[in-house]
Image (cartoon, rainbow, N blue to C red):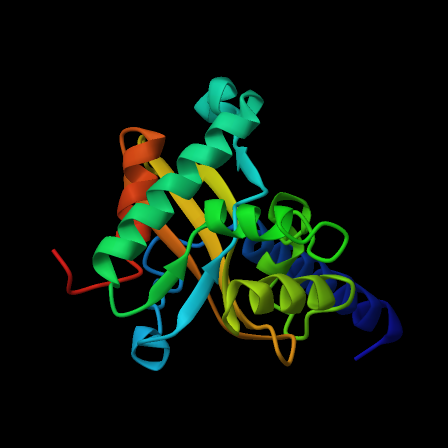
Amino acid sequence: MSKPLQAKYFLVLLALLSCGGKKKTDQQPTPEQLPPTAPLPTAGLAGQRVALTPLELVGAEDTLHLDSIVNNRRATLNKTDSIIEALLVARAPEVTWVAPAELRRTARRAPGVATDPDQLGTAFLRADKVIQVPDPLRYQLRTLVGLAGGRYAMIPAGLVFRRRAGRTDITAELSIVMVDTRVGRVGWRTVARADADDPWTALTKAVKNLTPGVP
């Protein structure tokens, strides 16, 4: 093959690879391609006190026009915490859940020692690559959960409302992790995901997906 033909062949091949790569990048995963919600490991937590930390991050895609939810952040976080707590207590009663309100009381009883559970900065734990919890969060969790009388923390790390391609309803995606606070390590994580016509029903269905098999 002559040099001009080799150069032409190379340019055509490069263009084809570039186009193919772009198509792959632009494609969004279909619902079937998304990983399923992993069930809570309640069997290993039965009889234990598990701290349920408050949610600190909530967001929504602009196309959903959920400004009232995003802008009224404190009310949204409180309502989300209430839904998560109520469903976990009802659907996983073998675990002794230490609710966000109890964690706040624990922190107030130990000023200067325990960190306010609403100021832990846990949102970054939603990243898949985070396995070892860094300080100061590691120390803060160990101290707070220890004062509450337990070892494990169930951490809702972020709630995002989306609209998936080809759908008209709302998708709630709740990133949640469990941390062994004594060693500062994430031992379990998942994204609880569900669709509904309104955000709160979608969130409720998503949390229910954490305990499959329960009506």
- Residue 24 vertical placement versus 54 (above, below): below
- Which quadrant holds the C terminus? bottom left
Residue 86 spot, x, y in % from top left: 30, 47
Q: Nearer the viewer, residue 24 or 110?
A: 110
Q: How many marks?
A: 0
Residue 98 spot, x, y in % from top left: 43, 58
Residue furthest to the left in view is 215
Asked whether residue 165 appears in the rendered view, the answer is: no
Q: Nearer the viewer, residue 196 or 206?
A: 206
- Which quadrant holds the N terminus? bottom right
Horizontally, residue 83 falls left or right of residue 142, namely left
State the residue at coordinates (56%, 46%): 104
Horizontally, residue 170 falls left or right of residue 145, namely left
Name which quarter of the figure residue 131 lies in.
bottom right
Residue furthest to the front in view is 109
State the residue at coordinates (73%, 58%): 113
State the residue at coordinates (32%, 68%): 95
Asked whether residue 12 appears in the rendered view, the answer is: yes
Residue 169 spot, x, y in % from top left: 31, 32
State the residue at coordinates (48%, 24%): 69
